[in-house]
Image: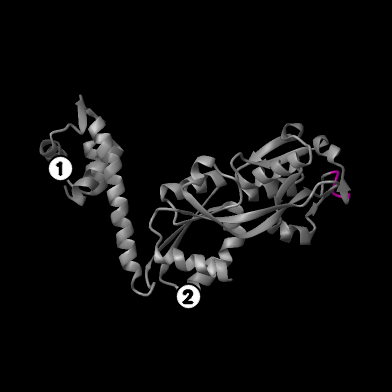
C-alpha cells in the first residue's frame, strides 16, 4: 500500500465520485478506478458499493479512511519537521485564535517572530473559543489561543498555559440614555437593550459568569442582537443600538475619541479574563511552534 494509493482512495471517499476525485487530483478516471480495484483485490474487501451511477463507502472503506488520514497527517508532520531543521529558514506555523486575541493582542508577537524568522509562513485562523479548542484537538492548529471555557471533554487532550489577559468594559454609544452617566445600578441592567456576542464566544461566557456572580441571570437582560465578531458589536453600540460588554483592547481608540463611553456598574466587579495558550498533549510539537511559544513567554 503506497501513499499515492491512500491519497487517491481518500479523494474518492471525500467526493464519493470517481470522476470528481480524478479531476481533483489531475489524473485520469481509469487511474483512480485501477487503484481502488487494486486495493480491493489485494486485501479481499469492498471499499465502495457501486449503486447505479453512484458509490457508497463500505464499513471497510470507513476504517481505511480513518487510518489513511492518520498516516498522511503523520507524513505531513514529518515533512514539516525535516524542513524546519534548516535553521528555521522555512516552514509553517498554524495558529488558531479567538477574535479579540487574534485582532488586538497576538499581532505584536507575530510581528516580532516574523522579524526573526521571515521565511516562516504563518497561517492564522480566527474563530470563537469552541471552534479554536476543537480545532486544536483535531490537529488543525499547532497552537490555539482562547479566552473562554471550552468543552470538558477536550481538556484531557490539551495543555493550557496563561499567556496574557484583558478586561471587559460595559460601553454605550452617544445616543444611549446612559451616555451622560458615570454609573448605573445592577437593577438597571434589565431596563435597557443589549448587543451580545454569539454562544461559544469567550467574551459572552465571561460576561455571563460576571452576571451570575452578581446575582443577575442572563435571561433578565433583553438581547436584541447577537453578533459573531467583536467589531460588529462595537459598531452596533457606537451607532446607538444598545449596551455591550466588550474587550477594553478593542475599544481603547473609541473611548479616547469619545464616540463610546464606559459605564460603571455599582456592586459589579471588574470583568477580567485570561488569555490561554492551548496545545495538544500528544501531537508532534514542531520546532517552529516551540520557538513562537518561547517568544510569547519571554516578551
Q: Is residue 94 above or below residue 84?
A: above
Query: In the image, residue 130 lies at what x, y percent?
Result: 54, 44
Q: How is the image coloured?
A: one colour
- Residue ID at (88%, 51%): 182
Q: Residue at x 62, y 40 (%)?
A: 198
Question: On screen, 134 above or below 58?
Answer: below
- From the image, tell me which residue sits under label 1: 35
Rendered view: 161 above or below 40 = below
Q: Is residue 101 left or right of residue 7?
A: right
For the residue labelled by badge 2, is the local secondary structure a helix, a strand or a loop? helix
Q: Secondary structure at mark 1?
A: helix
As drawn, which residue projects farthest toward the top?
52
**Percent position of residue 217, x then y:** 74, 34
Quarter of image, res 196: top right
Residue range highlighted in magenta: 177-181
| Residue at mark 2 | 116
Amino acid at each position: 500500500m503506497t501513499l499515492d494509493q491512500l491519497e487517491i482512495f481518500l479523494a474518492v471517499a471525500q467526493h464519493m465520485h470517481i470522476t470528481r476525485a480524478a479531476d481533483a487530483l489531475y489524473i485520469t478516471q481509469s487511474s483512480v478506478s485501477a487503484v481502488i480495484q487494486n486495493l480491493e483485490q489485494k486485501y479481499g474487501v469492498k471499499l465502495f458499493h457501486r449503486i447505479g451511477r453512484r458509490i457508497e463507502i463500505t464499513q471497510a472503506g470507513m476504517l481505511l479512511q480513518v487510518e489513511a488520514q492518520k498516516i498522511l497527517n503523520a507524513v505531513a508532520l514529518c515533512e514539516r519537521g525535516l524542513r524546519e531543521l534548516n535553521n528555521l529558514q522555512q516552514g509553517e506555523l498554524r495558529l488558531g485564535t479567538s477574535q479579540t486575541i487574534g485582532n488586538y493582542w497576538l499581532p505584536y508577537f507575530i510581528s516580532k517572530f516574523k522579524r526573526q524568522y521571515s521565511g516562516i509562513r504563518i497561517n492564522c485562523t480566527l474563530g470563537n473559543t469552541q471552534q479554536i479548542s476543537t480545532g486544536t484537538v483535531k490537529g488543525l492548529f499547532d497552537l490555539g489561543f482562547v479566552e473562554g471555557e471550552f468543552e470538558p471533554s477536550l481538556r484531557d487532550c490539551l495543555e493550557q498555559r496563561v499567556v496574557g489577559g484583558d478586561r471587559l468594559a460595559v460601553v454605550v454609544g452617544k445616543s444611549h440614555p446612559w451616555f451622560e452617566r458615570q454609573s448605573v445600578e445592577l437593577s438597571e441592567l434589565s431596563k435597557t437593550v443589549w448587543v451580545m456576542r454569539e454562544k461559544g464566544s469567550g467574551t459572552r461566557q465571561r460576561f455571563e459568569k460576571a452576571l451570575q456572580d452578581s446575582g443577575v441571570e442572563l435571561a433578565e437582560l433583553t438581547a436584541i442582537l447577537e453578533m459573531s465578531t467583536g467589531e460588529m458589536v462595537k459598531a452596533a453600540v457606537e451607532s446607538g443600538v444598545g449596551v455591550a460588554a466588550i474587550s477594553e483592547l478593542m475599544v481603547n481608540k473609541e473611548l479616547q475619541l469619545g464616540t463610546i463611553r464606559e459605564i460603571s456598574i455599582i456592586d459589579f466587579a471588574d470583568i477580567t479574563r485570561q488569555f490561554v495558550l492551548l496545545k495538544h498533549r500528544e501531537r508532534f510539537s514542531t520546532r517552529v511552534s516551540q520557538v513562537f511559544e518561547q517568544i510569547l513567554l519571554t516578551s
